[in-house]
Image: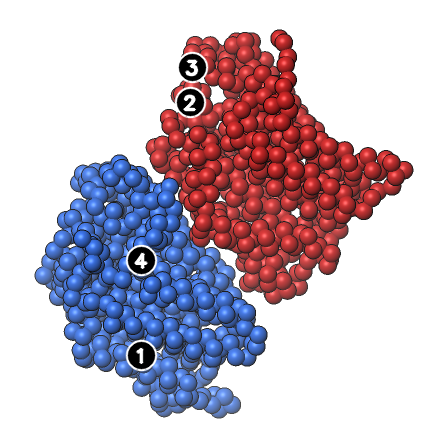
Chain colours: A blue, B red
Amino acid sequence: MILSTLIFLPVLFAIVIALWPQKSTIRPIALGFSIAHFIFGLTLFREFDPNIADLQLVEKYMWMERFGIQYFLGIDGISFWLIQLTVFLAPLILLASWKSIDKNIRGFHICFFILQTAMLGTFLAFDAILFYVFWELSLIPMYFMIGIWGGARRIYATLKFFIFTMAGSLLMLVAIIYMMFLTQQAFGTMSSSLLDFYKLSIPFIGHEFFSMQTLLFFAFALAFAVKVPLFPLHTWLPDAHVEAPTPGSVVLAGVMLKMGTYCYLRWVLPLFPEATEYWAWIFIMLGVIGIIYGALVAMVQPDIKKLVAYSSVSHMGYIIVGIFVFNHLSLQGSLYQMLNHGISTGALFILIGMLYERTHSREIKHYGGLASALPIYTIFFFIVTFSSIAVPLTNGFVGEFLILLGTYKAIPMAAIFSVTGVVLGAAYMLWMCKRVFFGEKGPLVADAHHPLVDLNAREIVILVPFVIMIFIMGLFPNVFLKWSEASVDYLIKNKANYELTIKGAK
Amino acid sequence: MNFTANMGDLLLITPMIALFIASLIPITIKVLKGNVEQKPIATLAQALLGIVAAAGFLIVFGGSGKTAFNDVLIFDGITQWMGLIALSAAAGSMILMYENPSTRGVQFSELVFLSLSSILGMMILISALDLLMIFIGLELMSLSLYLMIGMSHEQRLAKESAFKYFVLGSFASAIFLYGISFVFGSSGQTNILKLLEVTMNLIQSNQMFLFGMILIVVGFCFKVSIAPFHAWTPDVYQGAPTPHTAFMATAVKVVSFAAFLRIIATRPLIASDNLFEVLQWLAVITMIVGNTAAILQNNVKRMLAYSSIAHSGYLLIGVITAGISDNGTIGASSVIFYLFAYSLMTIGSFALVSMMEKTEDHSLEVGDLAGFAKKRPILALSFAVFMFSLAGLPPSLGFFSKFYLFNAAIGEGLIWLAIWGVLNSVISVYYYLRPVVMMYMHEGESDVASANHFATAITIVVTAILTLLLGVVSGPLLTLVESSLI
């Protein structure tokens, strides 16, 4: 029952908050809930066995007999850290929202907790329909979050976000239903369980686009490519990030983008091994283009938040390259990079939000010389920047290094082009830092009537966990990698016909 | 022909008898009181009692698969389920009639009489097993409806709408009747069961029979607003008083589809390749026309009218699926389930529209919803639930009904229709989200028109809760429908 509790606790929180009588105490109550949720999530460390690749803590009940749809949850090494990331970010996000969200606080917290449920459900569902329900459900709270608490062009941004993502995922629904009929043909009874899907062998004809496995592969891959987002489907992301309120941006960058990359590992690679191998070059190429394109576009952004948004496109490109290169190093690196990106980009968005709360501007040219005005802020910002540009000793280095190493072993050209992304990444981030923190004081910083106040205790409390994680993950990567090791190993070794067994089942 | 009616036949038609008696009570009381209207709540109560009695009889006596009066009426699973859906949708619309400014007050007993006659026509339509009986049901339903729209207090648009509906509806009926005459002429039958035995031969060899069948299909396409025969729908839906629009968009559509299903969804007929092709394209065109035109609308009722056209397109996929399946009844049961979900969401949406109409001549624009969420959070949330559900987002009822429909279609190999269906869902998201954007993301002072909309508000909240929660537990429900059709 651990996984169900983990998924549905936030719904309970949302209901309590909806009925909570006093408006003034909603914030601390919600924060308390999210901390409790995080602590509950820590019990997974005790219950989860990292030494086996089996599916663990399984919950399986028949939901709709007619179609073989099950309520089927499970966890393995691939999803383990993403769950931890989701519950780890929640209290920090809520604490960061104390100033930036100033209207309809009750509604915001309800949206946030329902979003948590949807995201955790997506990571833990092992039934195609259950997964699809959670996957689409995650759109609705995000849609409200951007649309109600967002910036000036929020409605355009939120509609674009919603329609892009939904357009991508509906073809996946057709593919899922089709695969349910394939299970019916193969095993006699219809089933939408992922484990049954894994058992299918779907005929593959190379160099022919209109063949079954290729079409199914693209129906799934498209849905996830929009979410990641893969170049050229990324255009919703900068709009959504810029208009979203700080908590929305953090959830979006921190967890929601990972839903896309995680699903490549969970759904696309094991289900369509031949098609993945055959078409991997497209994804590697688009990933590399995304790395370079994202970095170049980030360089010329006048808006700090938009810069970070484009840097996300670049960083997610690494993860895609790592996944489709498909060897042990690159996969471990991709999983690690998912966590890194969640932490470093999440922290960057929170930092930008803190600056915005003080000056109500994100234009780089309005700043300059911020280092002397806000020294503590500057220190935090630089640590996070280092993590983002993969300086050794920080977490970013480990992830990118593993991906590049793995990629170089398989496709040296791809690695060589990807490395330019590292250089460009350092260039745009450091150039932005130079313009914002050093040099002559800009109009906003020099404004004597509105002196800037450095970080207060609450803000430091938000940032410290991020910094701790950045260094722990940078210094002791093996502590983290060992939890996903067995599952990744198993995935690589059995890539031609991947099957997952349930722990304890014969 | 020797005509015999026995006790069993009379038992079977008890739902109709109940409706007929209930329809007479209010106007009889009015006449006995010397043309003085009794309290509207009493009238409503009598009407609802009649509907509940009819539903009860339908549950008890219907669904056995028995036929009555020399195979003119049939009471099988389709009759039972479609009848229950239509009756509950009609009950919902009558609650709206009780409180809407353009239908309440004077002449309410006449309105209830006409509504119940219309529902009586519906019951005949869904149980008819004879082309002429279908025609009688269709006419009784439609003629009452023309009068209902025409007698509303709203001055200009409703009269226009009633007239337009009357002219086009009669036109469709004429085409339908003309088709029946060709079919009768070429086959010598009007009974559907007997017709089906000869269809396989005639449809390939006899052009006259095919022509007649096509005219029947066209007549139905008018009734259920399949493009390109949909042009009357937006004008009539917008012009008619909102409760009547809800009545038309749900109950009338449900029963029309029931009869459509009975005639068209038969293997011998669909086996005609041309008809099969044409029906598929009609479904695709209908979805595209409905969804793209809905994007351009600013009037909420007009938008919902186009959305209802689009949903006819989705339903046609299900009807085709039901037609080509050899065994199993997943096609028909997915249509029934879809109609149920669609009726629930549509009644709820129109109920909210009805609540926000200040006077009989006021028509709700999308912009009028600005800031509604702040004023009425529960109603706004309910409306958002309807919109998300109509767009087919999980975990609402709308998602599961679409899932069942596409599942059935893909199971019969109609993958490309399912793909058209999901692509259209993407288009539809845009306009379904517009009211939500207005309610939640714009500042404004919109509010419900007046306080005395208690029953309508209850209807909205109940339908919203059902829409939100019923989807998750809908598996057994679908299985129940499916097993009753065999």
Asked if disc 3 and disc 1 are in contact, CB closer than 8 Å, the reply is: no
Tell me the mark number nearer the camera, choosing from 2 and 4: 4
Name the spot of residue B31 as percent of width and height, x first: 86, 35
Q: On the same chain: label 2 and label 1?
A: no
- In the picture, the disc for residue B200 is 3
Are callouts 1 and 4 both on one chain?
A: yes
Residue A410 picture location, percent across and down = 11, 58
Left or right: residue A147 compared with residue A133: right
Please give the residue where the numbered disc 1 appears in the rendered image.
Answer: A466
Question: Quadrant location of the N terminus of chain A?
Answer: bottom left
| Chain holding disc 2 | B
Residue identified by numbered label 2: B267
Q: Residue at x 52, y 39 (%)?
A: B339
Can I make out residue B274 in this image? no
Mark 4 belongs to chain: A
Question: Are circles 3 and 2 on residues that touch, CB within 8 Å?
Answer: no
Badge 2 density bin: few <14, some 14–19, many ≥20, Cα 10 Å: some
Between circles 2 and 1, the one closer to the viewer is: 2
Q: Nearer the viewer, residue A336 or A319?
A: A336
Residue drawn at x 44%, y 51% as measured from the top left: B472
Seen from the viewer's position, the closer of residues A134 and A126 is: A126
Spatial CA distance of label 2 from label 4 is 43 Å
Element type at mark 4? strand
Specify the subunit that label 3 lies on.
Answer: B
Marks 2 and 1, Cα distance to the nearest angstrom? 65 Å
Extreme residue toward the left, this view? A409
Q: Which amino acid type is shown beneath numbered disc 4?
A: Glu
| Alpha carbon separation for disc pair 3 and 1 | 73 Å
Left or right of A251 on screen, residue A360: right
Q: Nearer the viewer, mark 1 or mark 4?
A: 4
Q: Callout 3: 10 Å neighbours few (<14), some, many (20+)?
A: some
